[in-house]
Amino acid sequence: MSLLESLGLRGESTQVQNAEFVAFINDEANTETMRRYVTQRMLPHAVVICGQIQQAITYLQKMDRPPLQLVVDVSNSDTPLSDLSSLAEECDPSVDVYVLGAQNDVGLYRSLLQLGIRDYLVKPLTVDLLTRTLGTAQPGHAEQIQRTRTGKVITVLGTRGGAGVSTVATHLALHLAEDRQRRVALVDLDISGGLVSVLLGMPTNQGLIDVLQNVQRLDPQYMDRTLLKFSNRLFVLSGEQDYNDFFEPADGALGQLIDVLKHYYHYVIIDSPRLGSGISKLTEEALSHSKLVYLLADRTVHSARNVMRLTRHISARANEPTVSVLMNHTAPVTSAHISKEDFTSATQRPILLELPYDIAAITLAQNLGERLNQKSSFAKAIMQLANDLSGVEQAKEKSKSLWSAATRSS
């Protein structure tokens, strides 16, 4: 059975993995018009299907990589904004999305444009209308338009050595990519050879160093050659220079890289070395381009003092990132540790989540270069962290109108 048949759809047999233009239209007449447009334009990798927006969401989940252009029809939808919110969960920020409707609704049109939709078309379609609207656009070029949908940039930072930054960043990225089906870029800023590649059982390269030296050349093709592919959803950027080598990135290079990555991924997760570690310049730039910063702490006076110092240092930035404290137990908690109550009282910061001491599961996963046992207590805590990050629990309490938290501006 073909993929289209498994989805209960009719359409072209173009391989999903290669589709650059995808259209889901819910009536035969306009679907046929779209097919004529595709034929006349001689689009090489196009799929046009008579189907609903929910079927488009299922189709996107099956794709190895996102299309450049996507057309969806909401004319039969009772709750178009809610349906588009669900679509946003699967559609990464780089995709140019066009919405079809049956009414010339100015209010809806303006709302969609403000939320990052490329354009809104009113049916019935004509080949001339499609040519003027779709044919003149340059799909995949984020710089061509002012996007309001961009991925969320998250920096994970330790308050002291051995806080477990790489472990938390890597397994959070894995969960978001493999279980939540989000496109994730995981950036390891330790250019002397970080832990991310070990945790994923992957070879490393000079990708991060190369990109930071050639950031002006950064485009989708260059990224495809440079980022290491763990899966269809998770991509890694790291470096491993010799200990005697010296690398000084140009001012602003990492910021430019982050600005590009967030146009192509739902999440950009940065495994950041501690401030004062000798590569603070990259960490400082990462913090200045982040929407959210996770501070990993433990129940020590030293960690509590650094939570206060780092919070002041990070919050003073122009981008005003949200700072959340994670209590990561890298050793068994004993009576010698300060209490959770004393920690929060001293720092005046709530603890977003406690990650349990689970050395057996973490060490086994690291040595095998595999995912955590999903039944382990640490894996369950990572799942809870991902729920908070993506707003899953909030979505259960109240339906989201407009685009989801995963594609808010960074």
Image (cartoon, helix red, strand yellow):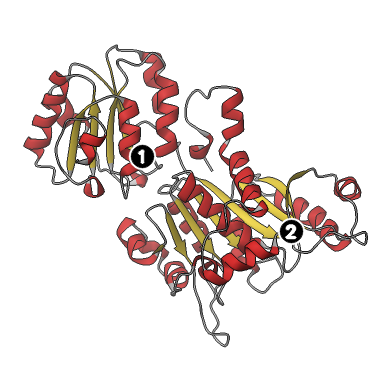
User: Quarter of the image holding residue 372?
Assistant: bottom right
Judge whether residue 95 can be spotted in this image.
no
Residue 336 screen position, x and y as percent: 92, 62
Please determine whether, in this image, residue 97 is positioned above or below residue 285: above
Residue 123 screen position, x and y as percent: 21, 17
Residue receiving disc 1: 145
Query: Which residue type does callout 2 highlight?
Result: Tyr
Q: Residue at x 72, y 56 (%)?
A: 296
Please, what secondary structure does the residue beneath circle 1 have? loop
Task: Tell me whether the residue at label 1 lies in contact with that at label 2, contact meaning CB atoms closer than 8 angstroms.
Answer: no
Query: Which residue type does callout 1 highlight?
Result: Ile
Residue at the outermost bottom position: 244
Q: Is residue 172 left or right of residue 309?
A: left
Distance (Cα) linking label 1 and label 2: 47 Å
Residue 295 screen position, x and y as percent: 71, 54
Residue 283 screen position, x and y as percent: 62, 62
Q: Nearer the viewer, residue 110 or 356?
A: 356
- Please tell me the numbered disc located at residue 197: none
Mark 1 vs mark 2: give the one in front. Answer: 2
Q: Nearer the viewer, residue 394 or 403?
A: 394
Q: Nearer the viewer, residue 222 or 143?
A: 222
Please determine whether, in this image, residue 359 is positioned above or below residue 220: below
Q: Residue at x 71, y 46 (%)?
A: 324
- Please tell me the numbered disc located at residue 357: 2
Characterize the local packing of mark 1: few (<14), some (14-19) or many (20 or more) Cα atoms within 10 angstroms: few
Mark 1 and mark 2 lie on one chain; the one further toward the N terminus is 1
Please, what secondary structure does the residue beneath circle 2 have? loop
Quarter holding the N terminus is: top left
Q: Is residue 236 left or right of residue 284?
A: left
Judge whether residue 356 can be spotted in this image.
yes
Please determine whether, in this image, residue 255 is positioned above or below residue 191: above
Quarter holding the C terminus is: top right
